[in-house]
Amino acid sequence: MMVSIQTLSGLERRMEVAVPAAQVSQEIDARLLRVSRTARINGFRPGKAPIHIVRQHYGAQVREEVLGELVRSSFADAVQQEKLRPAGGPRIEPITAETGGDLRYAALFEVDPEISLEGIE
């Protein structure tokens, strides 16, 4: 996961995060496999449909769910990695989320101010 941070003004930060395509496709495949175990598709017994049929029926929905979860988890990991303290939730702006490519997004948020208590006794 690649992370870059820009200071916009005062306490506002812009963080760009890139999640590798391999991780995205691995998460999507794992979720499709879980869905295939209980999927009810006409012409197949429950849980017996081939994975390519399950991908046709549920692929877009599963991809959206996985991308949303990856954005949330990668944002939390990036904030922890960079030792930031967000004051509120981020505003997410997608950069690229093409099928087979890296997931890249920008998160705009404000951080808590640094307060030091030196000299106060």
Image: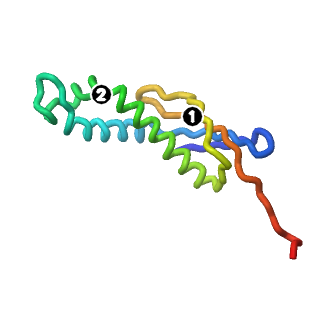
Residue at the (70%, 49%) spot, across then down: 111
Give the quarter of the image for residue 29: top left
Give the crowd class for mark 1: few <14, some 14-19, many >=20 residues within 10 Å. Answer: some
- Determine whether the residue tagged by mark 2 lies in a helix, strand or loop: helix
Q: Is residue 99 left or right of residue 59?
A: right
Say whether disc 1 or disc 2 marks the residue closer to the N-terminus.
Answer: 2
Between residues 23 and 7, which one lies in front from this camera angle? 7
- Residue 83: assigned label: none
In the image, residue 29 sits, relative to residue 44, either above or below, namely below
Mark 2, Cα crowd under 10 Å, few <14 / some 14-19 / many 20+, is some
Looking at the rendered structure, the kind of residue marked 1 is Tyr
Cα–Cα gap, marks 1 and 2: 24 Å
Please give left or right for residue 72 compared with residue 57 in the image. right
Which residue bears the numbered disc 1?
105
Image quarter (top left, top right, bottom left or bottom right) of the C terminus:
bottom right
Quadrant of the rendered structure where residue 46 is? top left
Residue 110: % across, % down: 70, 44
Q: Which residue was labeled with disc 2? A: 58
**Percent coordinates x, y for residue 4 in the rendering:** 64, 42
Query: How far across and down, in percent of the image, does residue 1 sit?
Result: 52, 45
What's the residue at 60%, 50% (across, down)?
Answer: 79
Please tell me which residue is depicted at 42% across the width and 31% down the height of the picture.
Answer: 64
